Image: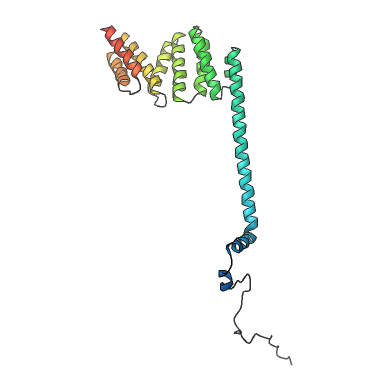
Amino acid sequence: MKRPAKKKHQNPLLPEDDKIDERNLIDLEDSAELSFEDRVSIYWMENKAFISGCITVLLFVVVAFQGMRILKERSEAALQAEYAAADANETLGDFAKANSNKEIGGFAALSTADAAYKEEDFSKALEFYNLAAGALNEPTLAGRAQLGQAFALYQSGSEEEGLAKLNAITADSSLAEAARAEAAYHLAVEADAEGRTAEFESFAAQINDSALAGQWQQRLSYYQQQAR
């Protein structure tokens, strides 16, 4: 016959079924008496691993950002020095080809193309206007490069292609208004010379409706006065 199991001694001051979770218990009165420094200390002890990790990650991000900024500034300064040396040595064309995917390379190509156009080397001018157009995104410079493409094409014997390029410029709202107005002016003169009155009036209206085409509005007005 088995003896009945002995009951463990219970605290007579507590109900037998009550279970107490003694983990990290702080009496309410004691908690109210904790100073701010004590609360910070407790929070730090409980979360120090997480906080330390966040600080470490933040430091890595700041260091990486500053490093990239410094590297970019040094790289840009070095490129500007190379550009100045190429300009002094009259080797901007080589610099432009070596940096054709960069804006400064596009600017070098634009300068080289302008010089070649002035010397009536339209084949070379077209080559470098093409390089410039592929590298420059700023509306004014991009417009200049594309106008150069159109004029170089026209002067090298590809007249229809040059006129088609001018038409494309007039319709491209991403380009500077001045570039679009210049293209429209030349197309207007071309249309007037060919007797295409409707086209002339359309291009003239585009120029006159532009708030930033003052120079080309004046030239158009002068042209109309001389044509009468």
Image quadrant holding the C terminus, namely: top left
Q: Is residue 15 above or below residue 209?
A: below
Q: Position of residue 193 (x, y in %)?
A: 32, 8
Is residue 71 shown left or right of residue 191?
Answer: right
Q: In the image shown, does 149 or 32 lie closer to the viewer?
A: 32
Which colouring convention does the figure follow? rainbow
Confirm whether residue 194 shows in the render. Answer: no
Q: Who's the residue at 33% across and 11% down the image? A: 189
Q: Residue furthest right?
A: 1
In the rendered view, would you say 224 is above or below 107?
Answer: above
Labels in figure, total: 0
> From the viewer's perspective, is 182 left or right of 49?
left
Q: Quadrant of residue 97?
A: top right
Residue 197 image point, x, y percent: 27, 13
Rendering quarter of residue 40: bottom right
Q: In the rendered image, which quarter is residue 44 located in?
A: bottom right
Relative vertical location of residue 77 with respect to residue 155 in this rendering, above or below: below
Of residue 186 and residue 9, the one placed in the foreground of this image is 9
The residue sitting at the left extreme is 228
The quadrant of the image that shows the N terminus is bottom right
| Residue at screen point 32% across, 18% down | 203
Is 137 on the left or on the right of 202, as rendered? right
Q: Position of residue 103 (x, y in %)?
A: 53, 24
The answer to whether any part of residue 204 appears in the image is: yes
The residue furthest bottom is: 1
Q: Position of residue 163 (x, y in %)?
A: 40, 14
